[in-house]
Structures are given as C-alpha cells and as structure tokens.
Amino acid sequence: MAEIHTPYSSLKKLLSLLNGFVAVSGIILIGLGIGGKCGGASLTNVLGLSSAYLLHVGNLCLVMGCITVLLGCARWYGATKESRGTLLFCILSMVIVLIMEITAATVVLLFFPIVRDVALEHTFVTLRKNYRGYNEPDDYSTQWNLVMEKGLSKYFFSSL
C-alpha cells in the first residue's frame, strides 16, 4: 500500500533535512575548533606568548559545535517521534544560542577596529623585539621567515 503524503509528513521530512544541516554545521564548527587548537602552537611561536588568548577561539568553536550537534540530533529525534516537549526544548535552546551568537557578533563588530589596532601594535612590538634577521637560526626568526615565504594561510594549514 502506498504511503499517504500529507502536508504534515512533508513538513516532518523538511525538518529532518534542516536538522541534518544543523548537525553538519556543528561538525564543521568542531573541525574548526580542532584546527584552531592544533595550529595554535605555531601561532604562539610566531606572535609570542601574549597571543595565547587567541587559542580560546578554538575552545569556543569546539563547545558551540558540540552543542549544535547535540541540539540537531535532539531536534531530529523530536521530529521523528513527534515529541512536542523535545521540539519545544530544542527550539528554545536554539533561540538562546542564536541570541548569544548575535550578541557576540555585535560586540566583535563594535570593537573590531580597536582590537585590530591593539593586535597590530602588539605584533609589531613583538616583531621588532624578537626578529634577528633572515639567516638567523633562532626559532622566532625561522618561523617568521617561513610565514613570509609561504604566506600566512599556507603556513597555518600546512601544519595540520
């Protein structure tokens, strides 16, 4: 016997598809977090120990990715089992996460020029203090020369 297609069953399939996209975006965030954690050692080698606060972005991506994957799976379960309580919990949780992300993005965009200027000034001071020359064997000069030769994106992604 053929399956009856109602608007509700189509909505259920659409919700399952969207939950799959949410889970995949969470997996991508987890991957970015792992990449940030693994590539952080080379970043602190080049910019100095005071740039270690940038490594917290990797932790944030890991936490947000895990939360997103768990909520996506819970929403999929709620849609499959038609559980109103689970769906309501997941939707409220996603609204809270969305409000937190919008707030964080607003703060970052508001203070971006100030943070950029401070970070550039710190980088220049660290570079002037530690860089000894092109053919010097110390770690700092070698790492900085490698970044300048290969380019910043190739340097960080080649170490993963």
Image: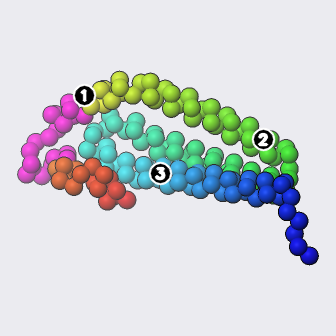
In percent of the image, x 27 and y 40: which residue is there?
47
In the rendered image, residue 150, in percent from the top left (x then y), is placed at 21, 55
Please say if 148 is above or below 20. above
Residue type at tag 2: Phe
Left or right: where 114 falls relative to 27: left
The amino acid pointed to by label 1 is Glu
* Amino acid type, residue under disc 3 in the picture: Leu
Q: Residue furthest bottom?
A: 1
Residue 136 placed where, x, y %?
9, 49
Structural crowding at the residue carrying mark 2, measured as other residues with C-alpha within 10 Å and reported as few (<14), some (14–19) or many (≥20): some
Q: CA distance from mark 3 to mark 1?
A: 27 Å
Range shown magenta = 123-144
Vertical comparison of 55 with 81: above or below: above
Residue beneath the point at 53% across and 50% down: 29
Work out whether mark 3 precedes mark 2 in sequence or the reverse, and give the earlier one. 3
Residue 121, numbered label: 1
Quarter in which the N terminus is drawn: bottom right
- SS assignment at label 2: helix
Secondary structure of residue under mark 3: helix
The residue carrying mark 3 is: 32
What residue would you read off at disc 2? 89
Instruction: Tell me which residue sits at (51%, 27%) in the image.
Output: 106
Residue 155 left/right relative to 111? left
Q: Earlier in the sequence, mark 3 or mark 1?
A: 3
Residue at the right extreme of this rendering? 1
User: From this viewpoint, is residue 139 visible?
Assistant: no
Label the magenta part by its dominant secondary structure.
Answer: helix
